[in-house]
């Protein structure tokens, strides 16, 4: 599904060059469940941004479902991102003036899905995520766990092949965090490829494959067959 070859990215910071990604090679098969761990500044978020087509490398190649992304125009990359990738962020990034239903529905509105189909898809997710009673609530009327479930629903409403989660439990208490990680794992069990950046070693160890980063390089790549 994903192949990175010698991917590099650097930034200028305070007159110095920071090597955020340093010749990274990585292959990810469809349906995998990976966590990406490492200290702050190790390149975790940069890697996630690259995988999600939110940033472009300085050199190297990125192949997604057989398409070389690095050779595409900005508009073509955006089309690939909208077609294949869903995002879940620590800060939720919900639209405050929209209620839960409208936030979840927004990706379908943007691609012109007919209203009846939108309602059917959104209602199914609201039921599954236990959000039916909160469908008309705006983000400031929801708990952190509820907001993150709305964000996950919005991310998967179009059934992306790849779901990228950046510290998805970082703003949650332990109970809500457990609910969110369980939901993400259920989606992975249904075939969605899940890549999660986390500082929480306990959460990271749940993944069947665990990447450890340091100074922009992949330090370790551990795999097993357990949940």
Image (cartoon, rainbow, N blue to C red):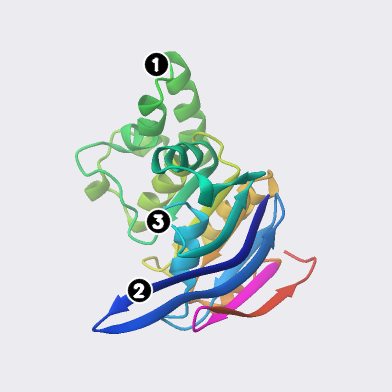
Q: Is residue 134 left or right of residue 187?
A: left
Query: Marks 3 and 1: in contact by CB < 8 Å?
Result: no
Q: Residue at x 51, y 70 (%)?
A: 8
Question: In the picture provided, is 138 more to the left or to the right than 83?
Answer: left
Element type at marker 2?
A: strand
Residue at numbered disc 2: 11
- Quarter of the figure that contains the C terminus: bottom right
Left or right of 37? Residue 112 is left
* Residue 188, visible in the rendered structure: yes
**Magenta stretch: includes residue 38:** no
Q: Is 152 above or below relative to 27?
A: above
Residue lying at 49% horizontally and 26% vertically, measured from the top left: 121
Query: Is any part of residue 175 visible from this angle?
Result: no
Is disc 1 surrounded by few (<14), some (14 to 19) or many (20+) residues within 10 Å? few
Which of the two discs, 1 and 3, labels the residue nearer the N terminus? 1
Which contiguous range is marked in magenta?
Answer: 209-216
Determine the CA span between mark 1 and mark 2: 44 Å
Q: Main secondary structure of the magenta part?
A: strand
Q: Residue at x 43, y 20 (%)?
A: 113
The quadrant where residue 210 appears? bottom right
Please say if 87 is above or below 197: above
Residue 4, placed above or below residue 18: above
Where is residue 41 drawn, in percent x and y? Answer: 41, 80
Q: Nearer the viewer, residue 108 or 59?
A: 59
Please give the residue where the numbered disc 3 appears in the rendered image: 145
In the image shown, does 140 or 190 lie closer to the viewer? 190
**Which label belongs to residue 115?**
1
């Amino acid at each position: 599904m994903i192949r990175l070859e010698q991917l590099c990215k650097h930034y200028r910071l305070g007159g110095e060059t920071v090597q955020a990604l340093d010749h990274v090679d990585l292959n990810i098969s469809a349906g995998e469940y990976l966590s990406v761990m490492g200290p702050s500044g190790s390149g975790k978020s940069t890697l996630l941004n690259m995988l999600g087509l939110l940033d472009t490398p300085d050199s190297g190649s990125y192949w997604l479902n057989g398409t070389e992304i690095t050779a595409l125009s900005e508009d073509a990359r955006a089309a690939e991102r909208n077609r294949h990738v869903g995002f879940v962020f620590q800060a939720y990034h919900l639209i405050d003036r929209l209620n839960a239903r409208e936030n979840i529905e927004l990706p379908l509105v943007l691609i012109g899905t007919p209203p009846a189909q939108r309602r059917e898809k959104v209602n199914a997710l609201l039921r599954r995520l236990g959000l039916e009673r909160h469908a008309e609530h705006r983000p400031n009327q929801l708990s952190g766990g509820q907001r993150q479930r709305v964000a996950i629903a919005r991310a998967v409403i179009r059934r992306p092949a790849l779901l990228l989660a950046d510290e998805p439990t970082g703003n949650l208490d332990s109970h809500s965090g457990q609910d969110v990680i369980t939901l993400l794992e259920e989606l992975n069990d249904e075939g969605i490829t899940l890549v999660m950046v986390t500082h929480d070693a306990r959460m990271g160890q749940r993944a069947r494959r665990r990447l450890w980063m340091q100074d922009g390089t992949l330090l370790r790549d551990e795999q097993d067959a357990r949940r």
